[in-house]
């Protein structure tokens, strides 16, 4: 049954405070075990052979020399994996085409990107495995490739999939295309809206692919037993989803695979899909040994999914008094080698911060010779919003309106009709705009070559399938087994806090863990800003079940009616003066007697959490532009965000700061650089430049709390919203500092310098 | 009869028909009825659609009841990262 | 190919291991000595996750060959706490929520410790530049800087 527990305002003891996290000591001492930290006796090392070509037909693969090398125990290629049908399959809540999953994991007919896996080996040592890769002979027929999204959309562009016809177009096109799908959202009449406008702004933007940049490369360890069962340890955002994907591609029964999630060293959406996992299980099955596979940093860049690069067109019309009359956007997103970019979500996020009568958004999902894209924190939204919030800013300037004032005049609020379907419920967008405007940052003085920019972001947030179990141990301490992976370290603490709050006990009495897939029912992956919302709801349901059972147990032990027993502050006591009186019993006392009075007391929840509340954020940034070098320095940054309720404010602040930092990197430096041969030229952290400590200032945070009516504590979720606004905010700040409107991401020194030089040449 | 509205992005699968009234008691029945009426929408219904019932969004909630006078909107599903 | 025998000291303990000539100190620590607290983020000296201190000098263990460890004194994150007593930096990191996923944390703690041993009263800017060789993707560095400043304050006062 789908579940929503309504928000109840009440006095809180724990929720909202800042206790220490349960996994903190392990992580600061090196004791915590991440993917690559697991080892099994007799294990082999697995390595992947990857295509050096961006696009090539694979005519043959000869693994004989590799197999003959002493120390090599198994080799797998496309021959070892079943063909999968071309259909969308629901895997938990994910919609996946397994025909694509199995191909992304191991090429079949064609290599579709530089880095595409073609074969894998398992050997006694890493150096033997590497040697074996060099002995595998692959006969490639190199084909012309295409990477740029606009080029890929042209008729006559090199075609990745001969049987791909654009979906969503009527009548069905006659020719195959790299455009896998076209979507259109709309409401009202944009032509009339533009006709009614006094001012129109129209701009085109481009973004490059960027990587989630998690510091821990993918790592897994598989052990297949001769009786057909497999154990898998892996660094993942969703162990149940990985289990489902492995089971499907390996044609194994789901319950025969036991996945233990290790601590995860960053995911941000990039660890939502399998890469080496099924390969490791297959190699283990073939070699009869455990197989460990750890990606190198270069493999992470060449072989895993970054975000789309995109071409974005935005057109906005408004009247002199500041009312937007029409909004239009076209989003052309790279999907990578297989369809499935987040262009639909990006399309739905593009204008949702505004109350608009006339809107039209067209999205195109385009296959190109790059790794299949993977989710990255609010997938698609930062790209669309870069365009939209830049145009909003330009419009505000043309109208002579303060940027926040202009947004307030058009702001979405409770009851606003979206252009993708429903009306918005209770939201906090206006509150974030007002808090930003009132913040000292907004009115602080600026120095020479400095400029200020504002931009806003919105994300839906989700709930989905969630499970947990809560067991009262014999001494009254509790274990909370969560199905939702704790990616940032912090959600475990928040769940324990909610349980302790419900039961009225000390936080330290609740030990949260994330159990392996054999210990709980299906739990969706940690994404969509869902964990505190959905696992929180599940934890509360389990807690309330435990309280019910405790009351029932006490009623029996004390021989009083159930209605006479109340639960307060960790103990059972008489409901009031008029109820049957009895000696109170603490949680510990009941727990000690539990075994002899009917058995252990436990609660659990298996829900599909509905009622997720959307999140909004407003960012203010000050930049300083060095006119000699083109370097843009972030001088000051403030993140204002509505999170519904901050269960643990320090972790919420951490999400806001971390997301902003990623957005800053996206804006200023990060990009995939491809050669003319379609090969990635910067697959390492030296040339793929993410922000370092000296690049960033302090990032101030303002937590706004407009409770989500559909969560017992009002939680909305907070992880994704903060990455959405930075690109546009920084572009707006650069414009404010220099008068230059930059439309090509990243705003790296060469690009800024080029723009400055061009402007100077035009003037002089 | 419940009032059903489809998001404009679904127009290509229903030949532009976006508003209808149906007698259905829950989301599962709704999807069944829509799948019969618009065969091209079928695949989409199974894997990519959420519903808003009287403005509350439900994803993967086949047994969610739909009242006689409910307003139901079909929208694209959301995932995350 | 015969492996090399190396004798060295790690966190004050004398240890020995065998390694191939091409293996890095990082690989030897993790795979031969099973000290997995030091992490590999890139293998090319760009991320700092593998930071260790060798004869008092902060360096990336992925850029040093294991055979070069012969006769040296190596300090890793596993040696920072004194039994159950955490180093002030470790404590402050937890208190300030200066870690999220935790993969960069061992490297940053070692780097921060190295800084405070040289400069017990660093400014925020000095901390940021010293830690510029340690990538963190989760935190935006704000709470890390606060934790280092606070630990430095405590270590000076105590």
Image (spheres, coloured by chain):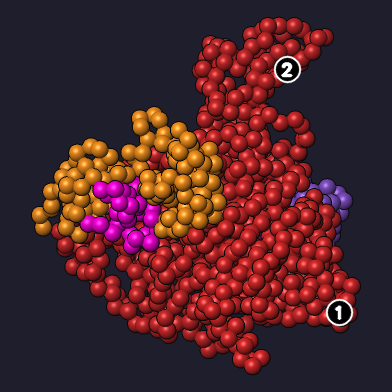
Pointer 2 residue:
A566
Relative depth, front residue between C83 and A643 = C83
Q: Colour of chain C?
A: orange
Residue at 71% across, 69% down: A389
A343 shown above or below C123:
below
Relative depth, front residue between A96 and A686 = A686
* Chain that is coloured red in the picture: A
Q: Classify mark 1: helix, strand or loop.
A: loop
Percent of width and height locating residue A77: 32, 65
Residue at 55% across, 19% down: A476
Pointer 2 or 1: first along the chain: 1
* Chain that is coloured purple in the picture: B
In the rendered image, the residue lying farthest to the left is C2
Apparent side of residue A548 relative to residue A217 in the rendered image (left or right): right
Pointer 1 residue:
A197
Can residue A25 be seen here? no
Q: Quadrant of residue A185?
A: bottom right
Relative depth, front residue between A261 and A672 = A672
Does the magenta run of residues contain A251? no
Query: Which secondary structure class fits the magenta region best?
Result: loop
């Amino acid at each position: 049954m789908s579940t929503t527990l309504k928000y109840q305002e009440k006095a809180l003891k724990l929720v909202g405070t800042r206790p220490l996290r349960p996994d903190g000591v392990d992580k600061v001492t090196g004791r915590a075990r991440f993917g690559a930290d697991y080892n099994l006796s007799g294990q082999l090392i697995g390595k992947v052979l990857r295509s050096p070509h961006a696009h090539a037909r694979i005519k043959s693969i000869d693994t004989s020399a590799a197999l003959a090398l002493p120390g090599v125990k198994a080799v797998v290629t496309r021959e070892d994996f079943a063909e999968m049908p071309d259909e969308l399959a629901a895997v938990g809540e994910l919609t996946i085409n397994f025909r694509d999953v199995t191909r992304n994991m191991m090429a079949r007919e064609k290599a579709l990107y530089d880095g595409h896996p073609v074969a894998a080996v398992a050997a006694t040592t890493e150096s033997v495995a590497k040697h074996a890769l060099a002995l595998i002979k692959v006969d490639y027929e190199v084909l012309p490739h295409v990477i740029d999204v606009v080029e890929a959309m042209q008729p006559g562009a090199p075609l990745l999939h001969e049987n791909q016809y654009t979906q969503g177009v009527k009548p069905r096109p006659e020719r195959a295309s790299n455009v896998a799908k076209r979507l259109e959202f709309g409401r009202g009449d944009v032509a009339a809206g533009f006709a009614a406008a006094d001012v129109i702004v129209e701009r085109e933007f481009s973004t490059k692919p960027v990587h989630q940049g998690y510091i821990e490369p993918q790592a897994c360890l598989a052990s297949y037993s001769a009786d057909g069962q497999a154990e898998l340890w892996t660094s993942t955002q969703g162990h149940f989803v990985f289990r489902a994907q492995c089971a499907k591609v390996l044609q194994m029964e789901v319950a025969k695979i036991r996945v233990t999630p290790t601590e995860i060293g960053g995911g941000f959406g990039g660890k939502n899909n399998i890469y080496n996992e099924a390969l490791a299980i297959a190699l283990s099955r073939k070699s009869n040994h455990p197989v460990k596979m750890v990606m190198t940093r270069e493999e992470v860049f060449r072989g895993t999914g970054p975000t789309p690069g995109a071409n974005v067109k935005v057109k906005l019309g408004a009247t002199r008094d500041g009312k937007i009359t029409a909004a239009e956007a076209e989003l052309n997103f790279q999907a990578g080698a297989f369809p499935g970019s987040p262009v639909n979500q990006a399309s739905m996020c593009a204008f949702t911060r505004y109350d608009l009568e006339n809107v039209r958004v067209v999205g195109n999902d385009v296959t190109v010779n790059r790794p299949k894209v993977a989710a990255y924190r609010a997938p698609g939204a930062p790209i669309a919003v870069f365009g939209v919030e830049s145009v909003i800013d330009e419009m505000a300037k043309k109208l002579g309106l303060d940027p926040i004032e202009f947004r307030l005049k058009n702001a979405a609020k409770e009851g606003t009709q979206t252009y993708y379907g429903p009306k918005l419920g209770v939201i906090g967008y206006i509150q974030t705009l007002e808090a930003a405007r009132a913040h000292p940052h907004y009115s602080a003085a600026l120095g020479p070559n400095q400029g200020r920019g504002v931009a806003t972001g919105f994300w839906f947030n989700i709930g989905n399938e969630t499970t947990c179990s809560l067991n009262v141990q014999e001494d009254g301490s509790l274990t909370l087994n969560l199905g939702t992976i704790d990616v940032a370290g912090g959600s475990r603490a928040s769940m324990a806090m909610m349980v302790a709050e419900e039961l009225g006990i000390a936080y330290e009495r609740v030990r949260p863990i994330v159990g392996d897939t054999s210990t709980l029912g299906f739990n969706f992956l940690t994404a969509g800003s869902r964990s505190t919302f959905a696992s929180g709801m599940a934890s509360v349901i389990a807690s309330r079940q435990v309280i019910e059972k405790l009351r029932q147990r006490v009623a029996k032990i004390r021989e009083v009616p159930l209605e006479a027993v109340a639960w307060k502050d960790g103990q059972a006591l008489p409901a009031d003066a008029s109820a049957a009186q009895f000696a109170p019993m603490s949680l510990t006392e009941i727990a000690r007697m539990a075994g002899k009075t009917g058995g252990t007391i436990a609660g659990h929840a298996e829900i599909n959490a509905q009622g997720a509340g959307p999140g909004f954020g407003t960012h203010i940034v000050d930049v300083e532009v060095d006119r000699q070098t083109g370097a843009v320095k972030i001088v000051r940054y403030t993140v204002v965000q509505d999170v519904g309720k901050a269960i643990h404010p320090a972790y919420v602040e951490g999400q806001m700061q971390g997301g902003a930092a990623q957005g800053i990197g996206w804006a200023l430096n990060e990009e995939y650089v491809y050669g003319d041969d379609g090969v990635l030229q910067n697959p390492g952290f030296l040339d793929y430049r993410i922000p370092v400590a000296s690049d960033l200032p302090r990032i101030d945070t303002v937590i706004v709390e407009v409770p989500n009516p559909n969560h017992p504590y009002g939680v909305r979720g907070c992880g994704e919203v903060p990455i959405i606004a930075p690109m546009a905010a920084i572009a707006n700040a650069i414009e404010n500092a220099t008068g230059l409107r930059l439309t090509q991401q990243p705003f790296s020194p060469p690009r800024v310098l080029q723009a400055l030089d061009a402007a100077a040449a035009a003037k002089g | 009869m419940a009032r059903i509205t489809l998001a404009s992005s679904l127009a290509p699968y229903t030949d532009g028909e976006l508003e209808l009234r149906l007698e259905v008691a829950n989301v599962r029945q709704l999807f069944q009825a829509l799948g019969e009426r618009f065969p091209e929408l079928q695949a989409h219904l199974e894997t990519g659609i959420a519903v808003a019932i009287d403005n509350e969004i439900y994803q993967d909630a086949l047994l969610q009841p739909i009242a006689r006078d409910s307003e139901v909107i079909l929208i694209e599903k959301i995932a995350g990262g | 190919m015969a492996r090399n025998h190396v004798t060295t000291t790690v966190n004050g303990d004398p240890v020995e291991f065998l390694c191939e000539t091409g293996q890095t100190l990082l690989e030897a620590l993790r795979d031969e000595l099973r000290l997995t607290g030091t992490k590999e983020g890139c293998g090319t000296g760009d991320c700092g996750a593998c930071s260790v201190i060798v004869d008092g000098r902060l360096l990336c263990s992925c850029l040093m060959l294991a055979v070069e460890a012969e006769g040296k004194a190596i300090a890793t994150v596993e040696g920072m706490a004194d039994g159950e007593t955490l180093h002030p930096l470790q404590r402050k990191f937890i208190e300030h929520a200066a870690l999220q996923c935790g993969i960069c944390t061992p490297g940053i703690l070692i780097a921060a410790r190295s800084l405070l041993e040289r400069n017990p009263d660093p400014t925020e800017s000095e901390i940021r530049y010293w830690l510029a060789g340690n990538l963190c993707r989760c935190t935006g560095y704000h709470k890390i800087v606060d934790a280092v400043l606070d630990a430095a304050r405590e270590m000076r006062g105590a």
